Image (spheres, rainbow, N blue to C red):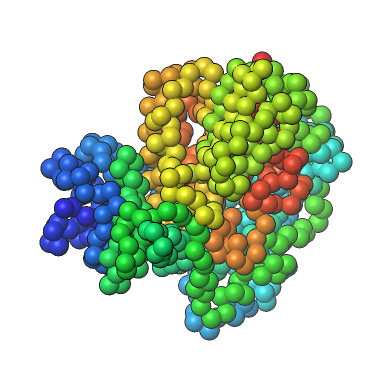
Amino acid sequence: MLETLTVGCRCIISEQNKTVESVPEKDFGKCNLLMKEERKKKIQEKENNIQSMYIPIELYFFIFQPYSVEEALGEAVEERRLLDSVTWPETPLIPVNFTLKQTSDPAHSTFTILPGGGEWRVGDHLKVIIQVKDFEGHPKTSGGDFIVARLHNPKLGAGVAGQVLDHVNGSYSAVFPLLWNGSAEVQVTLVHSSEAVTVLRRLSTEQPDRIHFKSLFRSGSESETTTCNICLRPNNQPICNYTDLRTGEPWFCFKPKNLSCHTRINHSKGGYKENLRKNEKELFQSCVNMKVSIQAVGSTSILVLPKKEGNIVTPGPFGYYYQQMWQALGDTPVHQFNSPSAITECLKGKVIHLYGDSTIRQWFDHLRKALPDLKEFDLHSSKQSGPFMTLDYPNNIMVTYRCHGPPIRFGDVPTSQLRYIANELDDVVGGSNTVVVIGIWSHFSTFPIDIYIRRLQTIRRAVIGLLDRAPGTLVIIRTANLKHLTLHETLTNSDWYSLQRDKVLRAIFKGISVHLVDAWEMVLAHHLPHNLHPQPPIIKNMINVVLSYICPK
């Protein structure tokens, strides 16, 4: 039987304990391809044996996708391109006994608004230069800091995200489109120093299992709990293989000592290991060097004059806030659905399926609360993981929610309810009355980005299949967003991890007939604090974007 493993630090293609070829762990594309080339002669054997089998061998990663060699080659090439697209500038190595002295310090760093030719008008662009300095006040000479910026006017309820460019020499620039008359104030934030990014990178490579999961196995009065994950550290325990047959998505648990693999009844988050080296905690201090504002040299704001005749506003971001309402800069204007009757009229006759993590469940909760006639059908499911269903019989509206398959950091999900989004989409009939909403990112942050790429590729195949058989289906995808950061949240779900996944998601679905809700910009541009689950005013704007896609006129 063909297996794809990582033993120690190498990805190995093996057959009946005989090594066929060994390639570096980093080259997962080649590793995938080598396995898929054996697909035709091995797939039947795999299908006959894969379900709940256990493998008494050392195993770290299992990579299996039952697709043709042509598809495998295409995905390997795409994966390489995607990895290149999220390449971050080099960041400094961290000595064992380092101090903060030579690391990036937002308190010493500055930004300066560049002159705009005497005046700024709507349709122009504002440019800001940022100089990062260390704790001794010396300018940094390398890049890699994670910086975000926004332009805003609290009185007007206006805000827009800036585009930050790393010049790889300690300086950065931020560019903002000028979209409203009046005052516009610049805010620049150091999310992570380049040294902190070094640590986050290392954790992804060396400690992808720093969050682990567990499952309960039960038969009669006997029960055992074991550790589960996409990746399991080698030991002498046999392993239960729960790789999904339809998608090839891997999942493993250590086999219980006295129970079979077939007796697994649930899935839950198991725990977390910090795995930081000496002094590395100092790189992740709120109010010191993590998500701290950088101060200006000179003014922080400008006065924007009305647009000149013929001056065109060139799109950069997806949109901006004005009077607390999100304004799209793309083809679909955002309408305001301010009453239950307006939302009901839009959704009349529709079936809306929401798939994903808790940030998508938040949308389900918003709709359920906003529409008094939308009654929940009690499926006796977990309040965290679902599944959920709500119905409005008179208006023929159904809204459902289901969480995505593992890895999922929810508590006590029955194994019968562990479903992969791609499989769910394959079972959707679709049509002009069907809306599919997908949001999947937060629970993949601790794993190498290859894992996330592969998950999105399987979802994309299912989306394309759905649109091929039912072209009228509307597919909407929610991007990642920034969040409040503590040490724990940073090491497991940093905004830096989210940014990488956000870039990959946009690239994978580019050119496909899907619509994006740009949660990243909608959170960054808003005056409210960043939160994994954005506050109600932001969610209301997100739902207005969704409804505007469903009812564009």
| Residue at the (37%, 58%) spot, across then down | 219
Q: Is residue 28 left or right of residue 464?
A: left
Q: Is residue 489 left or right of residue 425?
A: right
Residue 232, percent from left and from top: 36, 64
Residue 421, percent from left and from top: 44, 39
Residue 480, percent from left and from top: 57, 45
Q: Is residue 183 above or below residue 241?
A: above
| Residue at the (57%, 47%) spot, across then down | 382
Residue 220, percent from left and from top: 39, 59
| Residue at the (52%, 67%) spot, across then down | 272
Q: Is residue 236 above or below residue 74?
A: below
| Residue at the (68%, 28%) spot, across then down | 374
Q: Quadrant of the C terminus?
A: top right
Q: Residue furthest bottom?
A: 97
Q: Is residue 303 above or below residue 256?
A: above
Q: Is residue 437 left or right of residue 426?
A: right
User: For this rendering, which residue is in front, 257 or 156?
Assistant: 257
Q: Residue furthest front?
A: 221
User: For this rendering, which residue is in front, 535 or 500?
Assistant: 535
